[in-house]
Amino acid sequence: MKLQNKAMLITYPDSLGHNLKDLSQVMDRYFSKAIGGIHLLPFFPSHGDRGFSPMTYEKVAPEFGTWSDVEKLGEQYYLMFDFMINHISAHSDYYLDLQKNKEKSPWRDLFLSWDKFWPAGRPTQADVDLIYKRKDKAPWEELEFADGSREKMWNTFGPDQIDLDVRTEVTKRFVKETLQQLVKHQASLIRLDAFAYAVKKLDTSDFFVEPEIWDLLDEVRQDLAGTDAQILPEIHEHYSLPRKVSEHGYFIYDFALPMVLLYSLYTGKSQRLAAWLKQCPMKQFTTLDTHDGLGVVDAKDILTDEEIDYTTQELYKVGANVKRKYSSAEYNNLDIYQINTTYYSALGNDDQKYFLARLLQVFAPGIPQIYYVGLLAGENDLDLLERTKEGRNINRHYYSLEEIDQEVKRPVVAKLLKLLEFRNTEAAFDLDGRLEVAAPSEHEIVLKRINQAGDREAVLRVDLAALTYQISVNGEEISL
């Protein structure tokens, strides 16, 4: 199925029920009108990071189901799968073969050797300091071969996630064959996880290295030539970087919106939000919540440093069970620029504020993505957090079928589902159309979505201080 201009659900294969069959049942029973697409978070056999350390892309992890279960979902919803273009598991057959056979392994060039990357006498401390790192040490893990010899291998993320060498023919072939296989299994979109880390080059930060990063994206686009599939490069950083990706014609994420919206709802002020939405492209996916924490760095320079600090402090003050320590090393937080919370709890478990946030997301440029916990207006899961000591698990509740049946009856959830159905069926939200933004006063914002033909317009008026809203379509007020 081709990508459609309909709201996308983000979910793990075992978070709405126990497996893909349960997910299919839940979708059919409750969400088929509200949701048009599903970002199915990694469902491959994996050795950690909740699926983001895949051992292979050829199979569905048996605890989740089979390819036929995935394809059944793809018959009714456009699907997005993850491809970790930067790394693969140290427990993969590819890496185990390298460990056993060393230079004789056909997968020798699949992986990026830290030792072979650097010229003699390097890296210096200055070289290591220059690297854009996700940890407080040089990004390598030592591989001990079967013969007892050792070699350092490039390792950006967790110790199991070994970096690929995207320059080699072996890796190029692996990428192409994997992507084409995913498309055969109903992928409409492929999310390139951590793509900005994939290119390494001497005397650079090894992050978003230009122009080589564009060559890599072009290669991936060519790998999918002749299919309907598109790619969504994922990058959590200053908004100027995804903006560059957008200018090259790709879909992007709006990861700045979550913090900008929190600031707007905390202060009751509309100017920052209005200024940001005027800049946004239509070819994007909007988020308020994902499987990770709320990105802070994404909103830098959209909000001032003082406004970001205010939003962060206010989040810890008014958020429900949002504590600074949950985003610290004590709870295994990988990214110091993310805050671990559900969006509903970030707004103090307040139904009115939460619904307003979703309204503004729906009227923003692009296609709204909604995380499964957010779809059910879920509160922070402190039991799972403390049981696992994993900060991000505060926003990764496992819903039973019985729980879902109760949650969908809550007024805020029922209202949200009705809003998403409206978004999916109203022609004013044409991606080839336009958005007009106005801020009539310090507290008000008006968003007008107009389709390309110009014969449908949906208008949202929000008073961020009074927490009131009005929606009209072609001049006629509607209620949700």
Image (cartoon, rainbow, N blue to C red):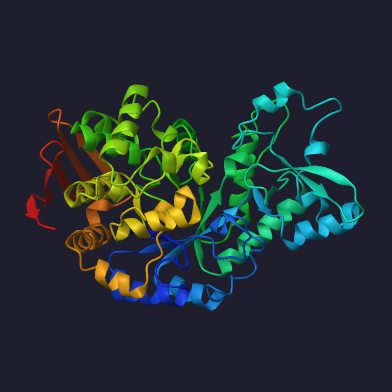
| Picture layout, residue 223 above or below residue 21 | above
Could you tell me which quadrant the N terminus lies in? Answer: bottom left
| Picture layout, residue 183 above or below residue 147 | below
Res 323 visible: yes
Q: Between 237 and 186, which is closer to the camera in this rendering?
A: 237
Q: Position of residue 364 (x, y in %)?
A: 28, 44
Query: Residue 203 lies in what quarter of the image?
Result: top right
Q: Position of residue 59 (x, y in %)?
A: 63, 70
Q: Position of residue 344 (x, y in %)?
A: 28, 50
Judged left or right of residue 475, residue 112 is: right
Task: Look at 14% across and 58% down and name the residue there.
Answer: 480
Q: Total label count?
A: 0
Task: Look at 33% across and 50% down and name the residue there.
Answer: 431
Task: Look at 37% across and 56% down and name the residue there.
Answer: 381
Extreme-right residue of the structure: 147
Q: Between 65 and 195, which is closer to the camera in this rendering?
A: 65
Res 291 visible: no
Q: Position of residue 25 (x, y in %)?
A: 37, 77
Q: Between 198 and 454, which is closer to the camera in this rendering?
A: 198
Judged left or right of residue 71, residue 395 is: left
Query: Residue 121 lies in what quarter of the image?
Result: top right
Q: Between 382 and 221, which is closer to the camera in this rendering?
A: 382
Task: Look at 19% across and 60% down and name the residue there.
Answer: 415
Extreme-left residue of the structure: 476
Query: Residue 437 lies in what quarter of the image?
Result: top left
